[in-house]
Amino acid sequence: MTGPIGLHGGGEYLSGDEPFLDALIAAAGTSAAERDGEDGRDEGARIVILPTAAARGRPDRAAEMGIAALTRQAETEGRRIQVDVAPVVDTASANLEANAALLAAADLIHLPGGDPDLVPAILAGTLALAAIQLARARGAVVAGASAGGMALADWSWTPTGGVRGLGFVAGLALVPHYDDIRRTEWQEILDALAPGGIGYLGLDEQTGAISDGATGAGHRWRVSGTGAAYWFPRGAREPTIARHGETIDIPG
């Protein structure tokens, strides 16, 4: 079994993001229920926050905000969760066995935003990345917001150019904070940097999409949040648009 991928347009953990947080927690609960069916325990969903994209700033603050927001939302909806932090901020911490163990046992791994170049650079070839892959192969949800979500694709763009991502999502690049940039020349800029054949998924802030598992692309994505999702196949000028509760099909 392969777990779903969640992508989010930014503004994570803030007031107004409750619909997407609830969708993530519900998806984590599904993963936990399958795990509990195997070992007979009922511990609630295990959530691990991975604040790698915030390594140049305040990863501790990003983690604290995540713990507070996820715990508050779970309590509101009567869901059982436990939230931990894997403080991976450099290659050394990405190779710590304690961090890898936390990630491997998770039902939801969540990467908040920060700088888009950091996650691929820090995680590539590490124990932490192997643990994330292992968790997802078991059915865990892997989700990222803004820079954290951008890094989950095969390709990500940064202020200094394109970089190879972690490859959890094929066939697209994430364009977060889409409500702020939709009127700019963003597509021409990215087309000049991006490899051929990929499309762009624009997500408004406090809006995300969760895939139906298997591979990230070539599947149906369900949108949750206050804004919308905009799917641009490569070269398209007009997007397919989906809003809260709607689905969007993205071919691989």
Image (spheres, rainbow, N blue to C red):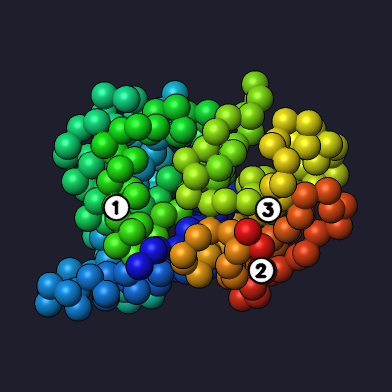
Q: Earlier in the sequence, mark 2 or mark 1?
A: 1
Q: Amino acid at mark 1?
A: Leu
Q: Amino acid at mark 3?
A: Leu
Residue at 27%, 74% (x, y): give it.
34
Note whether residue 105 is visible.
yes
Question: Which is in the foreground here, disc 1 or disc 3?
Answer: 1
- Above or below, comparing residue 163 to residue 46 in the picture: above
For the residues labelled 1 and 3, the Cα–Cα distance comes to: 26 Å
Q: Amino acid at mark 2?
A: Asp
Where residue 146 sits in the image (x, y, percent)?
A: 56, 44
Where residue 27 sits in the image (x, y, percent)?
A: 40, 69
Q: Secondary structure at mark 1?
A: helix
Q: Earlier in the sequence, mark 1 or mark 3?
A: 1
Residue highlighted by disc 2: 249
Q: Earlier in the sequence, mark 3 or mark 2?
A: 3
Residue at 45%, 53% (x, y): give it.
143
- Above or below, comparing residue 45 to residue 94 in the picture: below
Q: How many marks?
A: 3
Q: Secondary structure at mark 2?
A: strand
Residue highlighted by disc 1: 134
For the residues labelled 3 and 2, the Cα–Cα distance comes to: 11 Å
Residue at 32%, 25% (x, y): give it.
91
The local crowd at label 3, few if under 14, some if 14 to 19, many if 20 or more residues have their Cα within 10 Å, is: many
Question: Do residues under tags 1 and 3 come within 8 Å of each other at their CB atoms?
Answer: no
Q: Secondary structure at mark 3?
A: strand
Residue highlighted by disc 3: 201
